[in-house]
């Protein structure tokens, strides 16, 4: 028998209390008194009862003692041991597969050294023992589970270890989800709480749970006492367009020792005017000192004046090195920037970095009108600065002045541009090589899918209304603040068009956004609306750019295993690694999501209006993985609890039954005392 709550036996103190009660209880003395014959008979009768009375009192005391003892045992929760669980020699291995485990020393990575140690653990296991191996990467999983030393198990385990050592992607380039890995351990601990856990990693933990043995596979020093593994890496880099030229910001760090490293910046396609221009190549190098576990900031920047340079130098901190570019090194555009460190460290995955997005795409805009105004030119100037990092907007006006009767009609320009704006006078056949904005069209082009009527005066200025305030064209626009006094009647329109703005239920702004047909319609003249003199006008044109020509990606640099959201102007988009390490992927529905598992450059290819569009992004290892000597405060503690109910039989019900019986007996004895 086993007591689950031994402190419950303190209830036996009640026996001492019972004894004290009997000691201090009044003791009535028996005295003989002479009397009549009746009293003698009564006394004779009384003497006959005395032995039975004493026995009854003894039984009552025994019952009371047993009752108190039963209560104490109930508090102690007695259980009968049925059968203890069979203890097996079970070992759970958690193998860190994060990018830092790729650090190489003596021609072996940390990951490979860890696998070799795990193989030794398996070979040294007892015959009746079992082993489970969990790979802790971004999505932790079993390598194998519950395998012993039987011949069939041994063959399977050897095969798995061989595959692990041969698989280039077995050790990831990202961050490991340690918490999820130890959650998997809980599944085994639920069945066998005595299983041992061994965690092979390169991270040092301040607090480690007792049930876990942490094995750090990093090499801090060589056998000769020299420095062991260390790393100098480029944590991050970006290009900023400042004062008409690009400045390059780089973060460099060293882990494991102090070092002076040489940082080289190679700018390809520098100052090219478009993608077809090769530009020039500019190379700049700088020696950078990095203290151990410290980050050094390096800025490559051109200053227009000496005063500008002095002002900038006055605000930087001590950890920032400024490399001043001369006139021959200034850059207003680039196709790519390759950053590299000239070091011989043990972790080379972060020794280089690439920056893209410095080559603007040319956007040719044509404005054609018989009643030209400056509203569109002014709006283009306002929002083109917002898109300066993406587009080189080239604005051109073509004024079709009102023709005198009998004069030949000037032909419309319908090709060679990316964005066509036709105000009033529109061509019969619309362009097919760009997106189009029709403003108060006098006629209906062929195949447009919209029929126009006459101009319809409203009598007084009225506010526009939006059918859907969340439409992308209405971002940061309050339609109720835009008034109109006359508009062009829209008799009907094709379902492929979406109505965005209206007045009194009549369409004012329609859009059609299909792969090969992108059209916007303003069914009103700017002269009869307040929109032209409001900030809403350049905002509306800006939103139209974003709606018809969405950016493919939000930025040009991502981390491994980070979700990348894609959009497209054409019908499909192909994502491919420049090094061809991974198979290209084709997307036809947008927005689409992509997750890169390998660092490096990825190319995005699409076709829109017959024009091929190439863009590049860079995927880097996570910044935290550059620290190959990382320290964490504590390691997650996997939950485990032994299921006592499976091995013990609760005796509470039996003691409770005995308690009820004793209470009944005591009551019956007290009842007989009155007879």
Image (spheres, grey):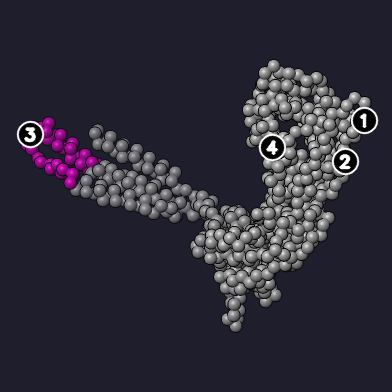
Nearer to us: label 1 or label 2: 1
Q: Looking at the picture, tell me which residue is in the foreground, 675 or 629.
A: 629
CA–CA distance in space, label 1 to label 2: 21 Å
Q: Position of residue 88 (x, y in %)?
A: 59, 62
Q: Is residue 40 magenta?
A: yes
Say if mark 3 contacts mark 2, CB within 8 Å: no
Say if mark 1 contacts mark 3, CB within 8 Å: no
Element assignment for label 3: loop
Q: Mark yes or no: residue 161 visible.
A: no
Query: Residue under circle 3?
Result: 35
- Crowd band around label 2 with a 10 angstrom C-alpha radius: few (<14), some (14–19), many (20+): some
The stretch in magenta equals: 24-53
Element assignment for label 1: loop
CA–CA distance in space, label 3 to label 2: 145 Å
Query: Residue under circle 4?
Result: 538
Q: Is residue 290 left or right of residue 47?
A: right
Q: Quadrant of residue 117?
A: bottom right
CA–CA distance in space, label 3 to label 4: 130 Å
Q: Residue furthest left?
A: 34
Find residue 415 and name its label: 2
Q: Earlier in the sequence, mark 4 or mark 2?
A: 2
Query: Residue under circle 1?
Result: 408
Q: Is residue 302 magenta?
A: no
Q: Earlier in the sequence, mark 1 or mark 2?
A: 1
Q: Earlier in the sequence, mark 3 or mark 2?
A: 3
Element assignment for label 4: helix
Nearer to us: label 1 or label 3: 1
Q: Quadrant of residue 359?
A: bottom right
Nearer to us: label 3 or label 2: 2
């Amino acid at each position: 028998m086993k007591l689950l709550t031994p402190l419950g036996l303190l209830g036996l103190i009640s026996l001492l209390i019972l004894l004290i009660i009997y000691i201090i209880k009044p003791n009535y003395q028996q005295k003989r008194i002479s009397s009549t014959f009746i009293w003698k008979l009564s006394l004779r009768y009384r003497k006959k009862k005395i032995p039975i009375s004493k026995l009854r009192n003894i039984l009552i005391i025994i019952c009371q003692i047993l009752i108190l003892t039963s209560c104490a045992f109930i508090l102690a929760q007695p259980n009968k041991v049925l059968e203890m669980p069979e203890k097996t020699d079970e070992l759970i291995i958690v193998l860190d597969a994060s990018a830092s485990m790729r650090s190489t020393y003596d021609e072996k990575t940390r990951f490979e050294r860890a696998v070799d140690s795990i193989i030794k653990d398996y070979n040294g296991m007892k015959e009746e023992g079992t082993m489970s191996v969990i790979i802790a990467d971004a999505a932790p999983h079993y390598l194998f589970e519950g395998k012993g030393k039987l011949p069939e198990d041994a063959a399977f385990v050897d095969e798995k270890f061989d595959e692990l050592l041969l698989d280039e992607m077995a050790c990831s380039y990202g961050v490991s989800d340690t918490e999820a890995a130890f959650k998997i351990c809980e599944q085994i601990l639920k069945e066998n709480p005595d299983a041992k856990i061994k965690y092979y990693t390169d991270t040092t933990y301040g607090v480690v749970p007792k049930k876990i043995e942490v094995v750090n596979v990093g090499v801090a020093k060589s056998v000769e006492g020299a420095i062991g593994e260390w790393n100098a890496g480029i944590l991050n880099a970006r290009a900023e367009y400042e004062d008409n030229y690009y400045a390059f910001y780089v973060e460099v760090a060293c882990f494991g020792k102090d070092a002076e490293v040489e940082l080289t910046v190679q700018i390809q396609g520098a100052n090219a005017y478009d993608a077809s221009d090769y530009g020039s190549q500019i190379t700049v190098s700088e020696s950078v000192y990095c203290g151990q576990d410290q980050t050094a900031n390096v800025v490559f920047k051109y200053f227009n004046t000496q005063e500008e340079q002095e002002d900038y130098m006055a605000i930087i901190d001590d950890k920032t090195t400024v490399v001043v570019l001369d006139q021959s090194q200034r850059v207003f555009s680039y196709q790519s920037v390759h950053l590299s460190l000239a070091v011989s460290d043990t972790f080379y995955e972060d020794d280089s970095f690439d920056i893209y997005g410095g080559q603007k795409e040319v956007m040719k805009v044509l404005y054609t009108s018989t009643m030209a105004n400056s509203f569109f030119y002014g709006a283009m100037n306002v929002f083109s600065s917002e898109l300066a990092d993406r587009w080189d907007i080239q604005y051109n006006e073509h004024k079709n002045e009102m023709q005198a009767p009998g004069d030949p009609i000037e032909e419309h320009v319908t090709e060679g541009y990316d964005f066509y704006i036709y105000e009033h006078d529109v061509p019969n056949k619309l362009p097919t090589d760009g997106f189009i904005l029709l403003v108060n069209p006098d006629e209906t082009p062929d195949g447009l899918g919209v029929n126009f009527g006459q101009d319809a005066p409203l009598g007084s200025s009225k506010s526009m209304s939006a059918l859907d305030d969340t439409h992308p064209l209405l971002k940061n626009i309050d339609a109720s603040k835009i008034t109109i006094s006359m508009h062009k009647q829209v008799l009907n329109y094709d379902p492929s068009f979406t109505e965005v703005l209206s007045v009194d239920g009549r369409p004012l702004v329609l859009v059609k956004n299909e792969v090969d047909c992108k059209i916007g319609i303003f069914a009103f003249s700017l002269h009869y609306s307040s929109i032209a003199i409001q900030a809403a006008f350049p905002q509306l044109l800006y939103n139209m750019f974003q709606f018809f020509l969405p950016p493919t990606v939000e930025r040009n640099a991502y981390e491994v295993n980070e979700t990348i959201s894609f959009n497209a102007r054409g019908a499909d988009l192909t994502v491919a690694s420049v090094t061809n390490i991974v198979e290209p992927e084709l997307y036809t529905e947008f927005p689409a999501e992509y997750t890169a598992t390998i660092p490096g450059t990825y190319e995005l290819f699409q076709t829109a209006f017959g024009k091929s569009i190439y863009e590049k992004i860079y995927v880097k290892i996570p910044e935290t993985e550059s620290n190959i000597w990382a320290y964490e405060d504590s390691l997650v503690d996997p939950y485990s609890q032994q299921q006592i109910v499976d091995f013990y039989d609760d005796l509470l019900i039996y003691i409770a039954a005995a308690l009820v019986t004793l209470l009944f007996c005591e009551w019956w004895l007290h009842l007989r005392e009155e007879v």
